[in-house]
Image: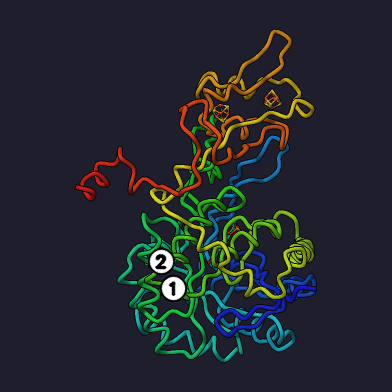
Amino acid sequence: MADLTTDFVGIKSPNPFWLASAPPTDKEYNVRRAFEAGWGGVVWKTLGEDPPIVNVNGPRYGAIWGADRRLLGLNNIELITDRPLEVNLREIKAVKRDYPDRAVVVSLMVPCEEEAWKKILPLVEETGADGVELNFGCPHGMSERGMGSAVGQVPEYIEMVTRWVKQYTRMPCIVKLTPNITDVRKPAAAAHAGGADAVSLINTINSITGVDLDIFAPEPTIDGKGAHGGYCGPAVKPIALNMVAEIARSPEMRGLPISGIGGVTTWKDAAEFMVLGAGNVQVCTAAMTYGFKVVQEMISGLSQFMDEKGLTDTSELIGRAVPNISDWQHLNLNYVTKAEIDQDLCISCGRCYAACEDTSHQAIAMSDDRVFTVKDEECVACNLCVVVCPVEDCITMVEMQPGQTDPRTEREVVKEYANWTTHPNNPGAVKAAE
Ligand SMILES: Cc1cc2nc3c(=O)[nH]c(=O)nc-3n(C[C@H](O)[C@H](O)[C@H](O)COP(=O)(O)O)c2cc1C
Ligand code: SF4
Ligand code: SF4
């Protein structure tokens, strides 16, 4: 059976599934139960300076649901821990003592002043925690006070604070990045330059998930008013995957460990983050939606997948897809496919026809008795029909083989690779050839 043990910046855990800093990790009671359920590690709910912050006393969450009311996106206006520092530190120490084989990382957010960091770090170190995660990500509330994403959006601040942290503690330092930025490589590079042992991403995305149209106020609504919150859950996974990939393939940050966060709900989500370069994953919304035991399916699913692929340990999985992340200009323009409809699976709903006829390339024919077929001479292989078809695998994209003629272009398919950089239509390529 595959070995799921991970060593992330020297922090060992029995599996790569950590709970992210959030309500699931905000107290000893939760964390003990999480460890009993099987989580490999936790990042404790962000600690701050005393006196503790105060949360609103009304709703904290907004949400987006799928048609089956499955939670797809969660928006929150919760702040960092609202419990005294001393209480959290005492509980962290007790938990770490009782679960020495699990990762216990402490998330921190204090003002952007050297003294504040210098003061809190020894207190955390004293608990026996395995590392710290710097919360430069929360986009609401704390950012208005010059913390969270207000720091995470300024690479110079990230580098400066990271340096302080590396100066005042020997614990590994993970910098948690905000996605509320144009190019995530800039803050990641700043963390790297400041000496961070790793980055974790993503924190939540600035959002308003909905507006109450009876009272004309954003949700969640507190006494008639609403504020933007932080968005997370399955809906943010694509954004998180891309940001992880951007860092993983950046030559400047080669080898910088990454903890992948954002919408991880199943083992497959975790595997996707890991093959794109994440050394482990952190989970929040899935635990909040399905409870701590959701980790058990993640563990068994990942283990089974690795066995099927003949992978013996997680190091063989991490970064496996990174060499296959490309820029558009390097994609093979000689690769040709055509849509093909499996008539046995087709339920004649006509969605593919409507999509292709109205918004793609008029490449699907509908007969009087509602049989749908692809016109190869029109099909540009965009695969819109595949994504709108309600029946999985009913439409597939079939690769044309070298020597065959593409009826749309009337050109022979060749096996040689050719991309935009050398294409005759590319003015840049023509110039280079001249
Ligand atoms: C209610 C709530 C509170 C959160 N509080 C924190 C926090 O205190 N510190 C932090 O770094 N991230 C916090 N997060 C962000 C999560 O750690 C995580 O980055 C984000 O939810 C994305 O992961 P997910 O899609 O698995 O939920 C919070 C998220 C939620 C939903
Ligand atoms: S792949 Fe695109 S062009 Fe081809 S049939 Fe489907 S929707 Fe139409
Ligand atoms: S969308 Fe799928 S099921 Fe519906 S008609 Fe097209 S191929 Fe058939």
Does residue 397 sit above or below 179 in this rendering?
above
User: Going by the image, does 120 lie left or right of 128?
Assistant: left
| Quarter occupied by residue 301 | bottom right
Q: Is residue 414 visible?
A: yes
Does residue 86 sit above or below 48 in this rendering?
below
Which quadrant holds the N terminus? bottom right
Q: Residue 205 location, x and y as percent?
A: 48, 53
Q: Amino acid at mark 2?
A: Ser
Q: Which mark is drawn over residue 12? A: none
For ligand 2, give the image quadrant.
top right
Count residues near mark 1 (Cα–Cα under 10 Å), then give few for <14, some for 14-19, many for 20+: few
**Residue at point 65% right, 68% down?**
19
Q: Seen from this angle, which residue lies furthest front?
A: 403
Total numbered labels placed on residues in the image: 2
Q: Residue 383 location, x and y as percent?
A: 57, 34
Q: Which mark is drawn over residue 250? A: 2
- Give the residue pinned by disc 1: 254
**Element marked by disc 1:** loop
Q: Are marks 2 and 1 in contact (CB under 8 Å)?
A: yes
User: Going by the image, does 145 lie left or right of 416?
Assistant: left
Q: Nearer the viewer, residue 364 or 180?
A: 364
**Residue at point 60% right, 49% down?**
74
Q: Nearer the viewer, residue 178 or 1?
A: 1
**Element marked by disc 2:** loop
Q: Is residue 50 visible?
A: no
Q: Amino acid at mark 1?
A: Arg
Q: Residue 227 location, x and y as percent?
A: 47, 48
The answer for how far apart the CA atoms under marks 2 and 1 are is 6 Å
User: Going by the image, does 148 lie left or right of 346?
Assistant: left
Q: Residue 147 location, x and y as percent?
A: 40, 67
**Residue at point 45% right, 65% down?**
249
